[in-house]
Amino acid sequence: MRIDIVTLFPEMFAGPFGAGIVARARAAGVVEVALHNPRDYTHDRHHVVDDTPFGGGPGMVLKPEPLFECVEALQAQARGHVVLLTPQGRLLSDAVARELAEQARLIVICGHYEGVDERVREALVDDEVSIGDFVLSGGEPAAIVLVDAVVRHVPGALGSQQSLAEESHAGGLLEYPQYTRPAEYRGMRVPEVLLSGDHAKVAAWRREQSILRTARRRPDLLERARLTVAERRMAERVARGQRVDVRPRLFRVVVPVGEVDRAAAFYAQLLGFAGERVAPARHDFDCGGTILACVDPRADDGGLRPSAGCVYFAVEDVAAAYDRARAAGARITDRVRRRASGERSFYCRDPWDNPLCFADEATVFSGGRSVP
Ligand code: 9D3
């Protein structure tokens, strides 16, 4: 592929095109990039490229002659698809970049803050592209962006086409969170699932994270994302601002229990999900990243020490948690009440007499009071 860039500031491209993907693609002989200055196509002594607008008004307008002559000289070598970079163009997307990458030759004209004579648009340009709804002082940074996005789609331009395949594999979703060593940094732990070595679980977690992120940050992308029916239902709930994860979020915790099997069943009913057996004498419940570990202190090999005092859960719906606690056979020690801090909560005890508290997360996470 050949890309010709028509610009009054060719020196702006030296850095961006001197390294990275464009340099690699040029070195590999996959793309040719050439810069052309319309100023070189003027015939007057002062190489004038702009003039005042007819009808008056501020600023200057790029004259048609230098642009016509420059582009026509290029077209005489081999026909190319002429793109004008302008804030009025169609928005650049990966689909647009892919489409442009199919051209054997692109001629890219960089607009200018003052504007371009309309006859250039009418008679010289095939396509108008903008890179987004923000104001640049010229088309040059946009050309750098466009060339990068296009070149990625030219076969052989990337070291391997694998990254490209992975991108399309993501099915129009945002990327999942990535981590590398160390597993804990300044108290921030890498999600346990990524350290598990369970590839299926990792893939499922990443998929979920991609969907959640897309729903929260770019719900506009969901329309065209490739999702299963269940995924779409979940994504749309999130996009509408509803929490999907109705599990209680544990915020302050190891509870010593008599029989792990019985504890697993009790807590599963209490919390509303099954948790998992991680050792014969230990059953874990992942409460939003904090693990509630039910351990048999007699069988425990000393790895876990019971948390002192009460275990606090933050829940979306205190009344529902209360019903679950009663159904699970918890001993209610203090029914649902509004506390001095403003939170609604209740206290109960599990069958091993561990004190538990469920509080509404809206108050808990706001620090109390501010949420009515
Ligand atoms: C007085 C001019 N502006 C009125 C709001 C219009 C204008 C014209 C040209 C504003 C900026 C520019 C220069 N920008 C580009 O040439 C440009 C651009 C951009 O500003 N944003 C996003 N994509 C692009 S592509 C080219």
Image (spheres, rainbow, N blue to C red):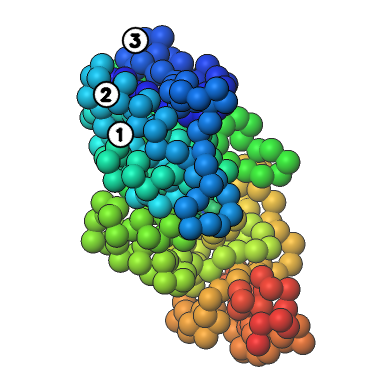
- Residue in the image at 68% along x and 89% along y: 338
From where the camera sits, is residue 44 visible?
A: yes
Q: Nearer the viewer, mark 1 or mark 3?
A: 1
As drawn, 366 above or below 63:
below
| Placement of the C terminus among the 4 image quadrants | bottom right
Question: Would you call the spot at circle 2 few (<14 residues within 10 Å), some (14-19), or many (20 or more)?
Answer: some
Position of residue 370 in the picture relative to residue 53 (left or right): right
The answer to the question of whether label 1 and label 3 lie on touching residues, with beta carbons closer than 8 A, is no
- Residue in the image at 40% along x and 52% along y: 88
Q: Residue furthest right?
A: 340
Of callouts 1 and 2, the N-terminal one: 2
Q: Quadrant of residue 333?
A: bottom right
Picture coordinates of residue 368 (x, y %)?
72, 78
Give the residue at mark 1. Answer: 82
From where the camera sits, is residue 284 visible?
A: no
Q: How many marks?
A: 3
Picture coordinates of residue 11 (x, y %)?
57, 22
Q: Quadrant of residue 156?
A: top left
Which one is nearer the viewer's eye here, 201 or 134?
Answer: 134
Of callouts 2 and 3, the N-terminal one: 3
Give the residue at mark 2. Answer: 75
- Residue in the image at 35% along x and 41% along y: 120
Residue type at mark 2: give it: Gln
Give the residue at mark 3. Answer: 29
Q: Nearer the viewer, mark 1 or mark 2?
A: 2
Of callouts 1 and 3, the N-terminal one: 3
The local secondary structure at tag 1 comes to strand
